[in-house]
Amino acid sequence: MSIQLQKPDYIIVYVSDMQRSAAFYRDILGLPMKFTSPGWTEFNTGTTAIALHKTGEQTQSSSQAQGRPPAGQAQLGFVLDDLQAAYESLRGQDVHFSLTPQKQTSGITLAVCHDPDGLGITLQQR
């Protein structure tokens, strides 16, 4: 018997600096903040919660040994109506892109930007 997964309920992003990351997701990406504390911040997207979880000052190997991913481990993807306008707005706020908007063979246009910990965030226009 196979399982039938539905929409994601939540995504946890492990971050090194809660204030810096919360400001990025709230002020630059425009996500509405639902709750914040020194170690946990949640954003409400209307369908899937995005939570930031502080990892502390650990090396990658020590955090993995404790069963906790190092900062920057996860990947987010968002659909946008106007990717080019979003790209220009984010570049104007000095957001780093590793992939500028490019039309894929599937017909979807993709871009990849990065949060303050280097987490890749895929932006797509269908």
Image (tube, rainbow, N blue to C red):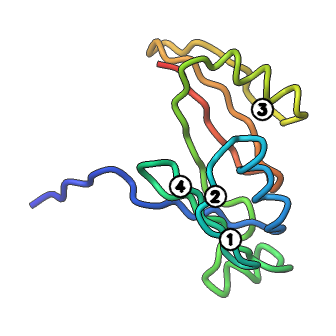
Q: Quadrant of residue 3?
A: bottom left
**Distance CA(mark 4)–CA(mark 3):** 26 Å
* Spot occupied by residue 121 in the image (x, y as percentages of width and height): 65, 41
Q: Secondary structure at mark 4?
A: strand
Circles 4 and 3: CB distance less than 8 Å?
no
Return the residue found at the far left. Answer: 1
Q: Which one is closest to the eye, mark 3 or mark 1?
A: 1
Within-10-Å neighbours for mark 4: few <14, some 14–19, many 20+: some
Q: Secondary structure at mark 3?
A: strand
The residue identified by callout 3 is 98
Circles 4 and 2: CB distance less than 8 Å?
yes
Circles 1 and 2: CB distance less than 8 Å?
yes
Residue 54, above or below 108: below
**Distance CA(mark 4)–CA(mark 2):** 6 Å
* Spot occupied by residue 85 in the image (x, y as percentages of width and height): 70, 17
Residue positioned 77% across, 32% down in the render:
98
The residue identified by callout 1 is 36
* Spot occupied by residue 122 in the image (x, y as percentages of width and height): 61, 36
